[in-house]
Image (cartoon, grey):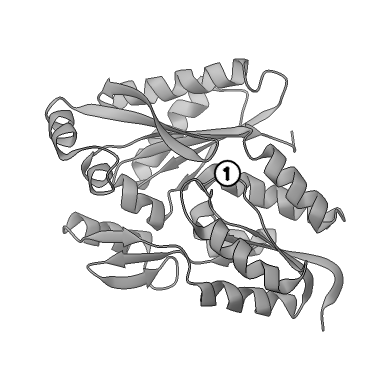
Amino acid sequence: MRVKNKIAILTDTNSGLSPGQADAHGVELVPMPVMLNGETFFEHQTITQEDFFIQLGQGASVKTSQPAPYTLLEAWERLLEKHEQVIYIPMSSGLSGSYETAAAMAQEYEGRVYPVNNHRISVTLRQSVLEARYFADLGKSAEEIVRYLEEDGLNSSIYLAVNTLEYLKRSGRVTPAGAAIGTVLNIKPVLQIQGGKLDAYRKVRGMHAAMHEIIEALKLDRETRFADQKVAIRAAYSGDPEIGETWRNELQAAFPDLLIEKDPLSVSIACHTGDGALGVGITQDIWQ
């Protein structure tokens, strides 16, 4: 029997939420698929972060895909047995076809399933998912929550520095020649996700310079785009947790008035960044 006026919040593991975190916040997760040497694994179900990076270090070929339609349909049907409506928040439509696929399938549910084009991924998507849960618990309607998420989605930035250009080369983001020159010169591209699309932001030499460039970009965002808002800044990393903690500490020193927390990048994102990537997201913080 469904619980009246109860809204389920569903996202995918690109949000950076672990199953334990999702359960603690009352959020449902769809595992993202990742293919290693042609074999499909599902994040947090059939592959761990540790196993992924071991195989990556051994030279495994990697590939990602959006969740299969039947996976979404099974999740929606299961949730609608206990809830009146489902709000599904996948990664940005600018980076994946997940939203378009979900939107097409949701038409059959006649207003009971609401896919959201939130223009976010990773730590900024995480913020949106938890806001959706918060507003649903306050009794906001699905329509109100979706409208807020889609209007506020662009009010965020992600900055990302990769330690290797190999995986950007494989995905076509840089040419093989550019990757070779970049490796020789120790060039680290700083990338930006704003408005749901991945763009080049700066090119620097070395990860220390990349960290400095990201921190300066965050300070500029805070002084301009977020000048009249309270903000949340959250770190992300791929691979070694100690590197992630060092990065978190750098951010905490740069923004002592904020509590900086961190998450590992999801396996499906790490397929494109490789090991040793450092990222950060800045969003409005409705809870401060």
- Pick whichever, 119 or 157, lies toward us: 119
Q: Is residue 45 left or right of residue 209?
A: right
Q: Quadrant of residue 38?
A: bottom left
Q: Is residue 198 left or right of residue 175?
A: right
Give SS at disc 1: loop
Residue pictured at 31% horizontal, 29% vertical = 189
Residue 65 in picture, x, y percent from top left = 40, 62
Q: Nearer the viewer, residue 79 or 177?
A: 177
Residue on which the image places disc 1:
119
Q: Amino acid at mark 1?
A: His
Quarter of the figure that contains the C terminus: top right
Residue 113 is drawn in which quadrant? bottom right
> Neighbour class for label 1 at 10 Å: few (<14), some, many (≥20)?
many
Q: Is residue 47 above or below residue 227?
A: below
Residue drawn at x 18%, y 27% as measured from the top left:
186
Residue 280: x and y, percent?
A: 48, 35
Q: Residue furthest bottom?
A: 1
Identity of the residue drawn at 56% across and 44% down: 120
Quarter assignment of residue 187 = top left
> Residue 171, relative to residue 280: is it above or below?
below
Percent coordinates x, y for residue 96 in the rendering: 47, 53
